[in-house]
Amino acid sequence: MSEQELKNFILVYQQKLNELMTQNIALEAKMINTNQIIEALSSKIKELESQEAPKRTSKKTEDFT
């Protein structure tokens, strides 16, 4: 490879590295956000489950006729 080819190789390599790092950072930020939403919803589910659920009454067969 000539000196110019090596310079071009390094230039393209740096550009691709920067693009991939930017994508990686964006994906990590989205993942953190998604995990926070999951944690909040899980807490809400636990809170709702801990509340006393109303007791269900079964219907008799006569109620359906």
Image (cartoon, grey):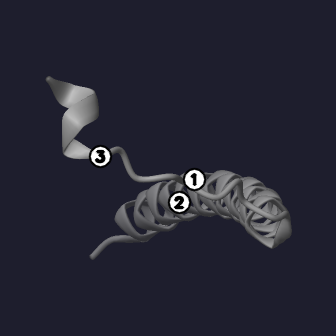
Question: Which of the labelled discs sits on residue 10, or is there none?
Answer: none
Quadrant for residue 56, please give it.
bottom right
Q: Amino acid at mark 1?
A: Gln
For label 3, the crowd category at 10 Å Cα-Cα, with few meaning under 14, some 14 to 19 and many 20 or more, is: few
> Is 32 situated above or below 58?
below
Quadrant assignment for the N terminus:
bottom left
Distance from the alpha carbon under mark 1 to that under mark 3: 60 Å
* Residue at left offset 72%, top offset 61%: 45
Q: Which of pointers 3 and 2 lies earlier in the amino acid sequence?
A: 2
Classify residue 34 as left or right of residue 61. Answer: right
Question: Which of the labelled discs sits on residue 20, or is there none?
Answer: 2
* Residue at left offset 21%, top offset 35%: 62
For label 2, the crowd category at 10 Å Cα-Cα, with few meaning under 14, some 14 to 19 and many 20 or more, is: few
Tell me if label 1 and label 2 are in contact, CB under 8 Å: yes
Quadrant assignment for the C terminus:
top left
Judging by the rendered image, the residue that carries numbered circle 3 is 60
Q: Amino acid at mark 2?
A: Leu
Quadrant for residue 2, please give it.
bottom left
* Residue at left offset 45%, top offset 55%: 12
* Residue at left offset 28%, top offset 30%: 63
The spot of residue 27 in percent (x, y) is: 60, 57
The spot of residue 28 in percent (x, y) is: 68, 64
Of marks 1 and 2, the one in the foreground: 1
Quadrant for residue 24, please give it.
bottom right
Of residues 56 and 24, which is closer to you in this image?
Answer: 56
Q: Amino acid at mark 3?
A: Lys
Of marks 1 and 3, the one in the foreground: 3
Judging by the rendered image, the residue that carries numbered circle 1 is 23
The spot of residue 33 in percent (x, y) is: 76, 54
Q: Which of pointers 1 and 3 lies earlier in the amino acid sequence?
A: 1
Of marks 3 and 2, the one in the foreground: 3
